[in-house]
Image: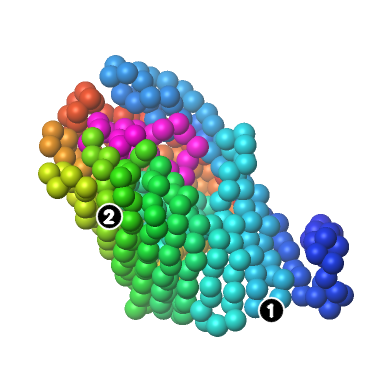
């Protein structure tokens, strides 16, 4: 409590606010630490490895995956803010930095740098994800954080968000602008039972850039990680993307200790060269079960999952399968299979273990082989 009072007092002194205004300022601190280790064999190694040549290799690596600190609070009954940086790479990386106006309840307006409204997996915080990394499908299509403005509303069984964003994308894009919208509906939403349905669309005006990376290669890595470039599946050579419309469908269900979740995403691309044609798509499905009796926590007014509520020693077992269809001549589908186990020592302290298998098929520049690796994580947040 003392540190919060001190931080508010410093902010008030700098801003020169009055005593009455000072009473309205509330500030709290938060953060998360995620430490990973992994052992694997594959053509590209795994998420912490430098990409290798076409030869198979076995290697071990460890990394600080996330090390985030944030301040959030309110400066008046209607205005709030959040500022968050990640220090895992050794330098500060901006995450959520925004102002929030909540004077139109239940609607709110966000202005700043935050995630575009797209994707159930993307909008579920890394603190609450079932697996250590998001899927290759999410890494391919979800736009993540950009600078812009959005209008959000939500209730006991729905959420809706629409926003317009500019530069600052996570995949090396350099768009003029993007417009994104997402709606979710939960016909059932209780503490231990939920059914989630959702749909999202993201329109990107890119113009002479690449939808995927600045080099034109397609990446299947989790773009929220701190690894090097990620896994590259050949090179489609189509770096003349003009516009893209990405659609996504979501569904999830929680029945006590059991849950299932899946998404389908597809890009409809327009290129400056009319002879170019590539509309990639992908899907995944995952399931989890708590033999200790807990349930995944569905937050209906956000259309996403939140913190697992447990008194301690909760165990979660999970599996998922995903397919990324590259829609390019000479390139096979990329398939992802993941097995996971999580131990929740408390609601804020978690230990994770994943076994991941990536099947690249026989894509251009990639020998027909798989990546197989074991990953473990220690995680705490506050």
10 Å crowding of disc 1: few (<14), some (14-19), many (20+):
few
Range shown magenta: 215-236
Q: Which mark is residue 98?
A: none
Q: Residue at x 46, y 45 (%)?
A: 224
- Residue 269 position (above or below residue 297): above
- Give the vertical position of 110 relative to 261 (above or below): below
Instruction: Answer whether residue 149 is magenta in the image.
Output: no
Report the Cα–Cα distance between label 1 and label 2.
39 Å
The kind of secondary structure the magenta stretch mainly shows is loop
Residue 100 percent across, percent down from the top left: 59, 69
Q: Provide the residue designation for mark 2.
A: 244
Image quadrant holding the N terminus, namely: bottom right
Identify the secondary structure beneath mark 2: strand
* Residue 254 sits above or below residue 367 on the image: below
Q: Residues within 10 Å of mark 2 (few under 14, many from 20)?
A: many
Q: Which residue is mark 1?
A: 77
Taking the spot 51% from the left edge, 79% from the top edge, the residue there is: 107
In the rendered structure, does residue 222 fall within the stretch colored magenta? Answer: yes
Query: Based on the displayed image, in which of its 4 quarters is residue 90 positioned?
Result: top right
Q: Nearer the viewer, mark 1 or mark 2?
A: 2
């Amino acid at each position: 409590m003392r540190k919060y009072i001190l931080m508010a007092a410093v902010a008030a002194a700098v801003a020169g606010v009055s005593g009455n205004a000072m009473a309205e300022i509330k500030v709290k601190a938060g953060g998360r630490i995620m430490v990973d280790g992994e052992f694997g064999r594959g053509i590209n190694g795994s998420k912490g490895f430098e990409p290798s040549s076409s030869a198979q290799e076995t290697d071990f690596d460890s990394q600080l995956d996330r090390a985030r600190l944030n301040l959030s609070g309110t400066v008046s009954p209607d205005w709030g803010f959040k500022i968050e940086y990640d220090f895992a790479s050794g330098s500060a990386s901006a995450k959520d930095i925004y102002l929030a106006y909540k004077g139109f309840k239940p609607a709110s307006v966000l202005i700043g740098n935050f995630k575009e409204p797209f994707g159930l997996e993307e909008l579920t915080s890394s603190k609450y994800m079932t697996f250590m990394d998001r899927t290759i499908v999410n890494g391919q299509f979800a736009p993540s954080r950009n600078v812009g403005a959005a209008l959000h509303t939500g209730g006991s069984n729905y959420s809706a968000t629409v926003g317009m964003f500019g530069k600052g994308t996570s995949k090396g894009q350099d768009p003029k602008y993007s417009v994104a919208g997402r709606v979710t509906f939960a016909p059932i939403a209780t503490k231990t039972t939920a059914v989630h349905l959702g749909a999202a669309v993201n329109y990107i005006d890119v113009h002479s850039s690449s939808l995927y990376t600045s080099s034109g290669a397609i990446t299947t890595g989790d773009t929220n990680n701190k690894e090097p470039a990620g896994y590259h599946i050949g090179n489609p050579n189509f770096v003349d993307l003009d516009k893209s419309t990405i659609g996504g469908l979501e569904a999830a269900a929680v029945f006590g200790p059991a849950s299932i979740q899946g998404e389908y995403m597809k890009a409809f691309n327009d290129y400056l060269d009319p002879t170019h044609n590539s509309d990639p798509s992908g899907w995944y499905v995952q399931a989890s079960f708590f033999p200790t009796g807990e349930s995944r926590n569905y937050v209906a007014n956000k259309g996403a999952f939140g913190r697992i509520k447990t008194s301690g020693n909760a165990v979660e077992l999970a599996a998922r399968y995903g397919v990324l269809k590259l829609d390019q001549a000479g390139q096979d589908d990329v398939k992802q299979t993941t097995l996971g186990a999580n131990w929740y020592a408390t609601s804020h302290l978690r230990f994770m273990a994943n076994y991941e298998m990536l099947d690249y098929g026989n894509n251009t520049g990639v020998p027909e082989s798989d990546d197989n690796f074991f990953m473990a994580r220690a995680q705490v947040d506050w």
